[in-house]
Amino acid sequence: MSNATLNLSLIARHLKAVAFVSVSLLVLAYPADKEPAQAAPVPVILDTDIGGDIDDTWALGLLLKSPELDLKLVVGDAGQANYRTRVLARFLERAHRTDVPVGVGLDVEPRGEGGQAAWVKGYDLKNYPGVQALVDTIMKSKRPVTLICIGPMPNIAEALRREPRIAQRTRFVGMYGSVRIGYDGKPPPAAEWNVKADPKACQAVFTAPWDMTITPLDTCGLVTLTGEKYRRVRDSKDPIAADVIANYRVWAAADKNRPATFADERSSTLFDTVAVYLATRPELCVMEKLGLRVSDDGLTVIDPQAKLVNAATSWKDLGRYEDWLVERLTGQK
């Protein structure tokens, strides 16, 4: 063997030894039974017309059970400001989340109470900040904020008017519109309530320069829990799931046109829960990037000239989403 060959052989052996020691140290530093460090939770603000349709309460419960999301503020929107704030404050108090600030929405129509009034009867409402808290939370955050909106948006339009720069520091995720499918899972597209209730506010939001993701009726309008999936939530001992169902029973009983057994048998349509899901992951949905324009009569129209929006237009696996929702709310697989 030549000296050159011998030297190359010795170098190769040395490199193998170094590689072995390096790998061994890595194995010791990261044992196989430990998962890699998780990313820090995403700071989130929830803007909601809670106290109207019950799905907002399901969405709030789901958000509180989502460790990927760090809830920084909740704000009631679309009128009934005092009532919505009481529902939010009591739900958070019972969930032991009084660390989450509660904001009072704009004092606009409608006013008065709603279907969950019996659940907050006698609840003492303290002083809470207004819409400016939403602006301040976004502008003071060291990280971009995900704004989850699940109702008509006079608050958000006003926040954009006061401080347009919030759009540069925010990712918007919401439950809005109807692209190809309307209510009851059937075409044609419909004027979806969250858009129709305040088209001007939606036009301001849909043209703001933030990254925007929505679940329209095409996906969120198909979510209802029945059978064993619903029974697992209905009978859960988890405190948050139990309060969701308690509110659901009060809400269902407030409408005398509903059967007395309605809340025993199935959920209502859980539109808003899908917005919370999209704030964590989109993989169970078919996502399309579409130009969407909001018309004056509340339609969300595909328009190639409009701002591009990430829209969940169909399900890859609705059953798996329902399983995920049940597991999150109950804390059990």
Image (cartoon, helix red, strand yellow):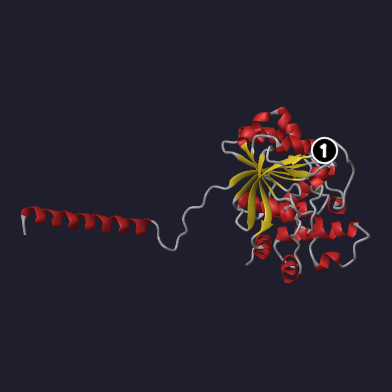
Q: Is residue 127 visible?
A: no
Left/right placement of residue 258 relative to residue 314 reads right
Judged from this view, the residue extending furthest toward the top is: 162
Residue depicted at 66% across the width and 61% down the height: 321
Left/right placement of residue 34 relative to residue 248 reads left
Among the 4 quarters of the image, the one containing residue 258: bottom right
Q: Position of residue 306 (x, y in %)?
A: 69, 38
Q: Quadrant of the C terminus?
A: bottom right
Mark 1 nearby-residue class (10 Å; few <14, some 14–19, many ≥20): some
Instruction: Please determine whether, in this image, residue 30 is positioned above or below residue 84.
Output: below
Q: Position of residue 283 (x, y in %)?
A: 60, 56
Instruction: Please determine whether, in this image, residue 33 is positioned above or below residue 192.
Output: below
The residue that disc 1 covers is 296
Q: Position of residue 268 (x, y in %)?
A: 80, 60
Q: Position of residue 20 (x, y in %)?
A: 27, 59
Instruction: Please determine whether, in this image, residue 299 is positioned above or below residue 10.
Output: above
Name the one closer to the observer, 43 or 281.
281
Residue depicted at 64% across the width and 44% down the height: 44
Q: Quadrant of the N terminus?
A: bottom left
Q: Is residue 70 visible?
A: yes
Q: Amino acid at mark 1?
A: Asp
Name the one closer to the observer, 256 or 121.
256
Residue depicted at 79% across the width and 45% down the height: 194
How many marks the image carries: the answer is 1
Among the 4 quarters of the image, the one containing residue 58: bottom right
Judged from this view, the residue extending furthest toward the front is: 304
Among the 4 quarters of the image, the one containing residue 201: top right
Name the one closer to the observer, 199 or 252.
199
Judged from this view, the residue extending furthest toward the left is: 2
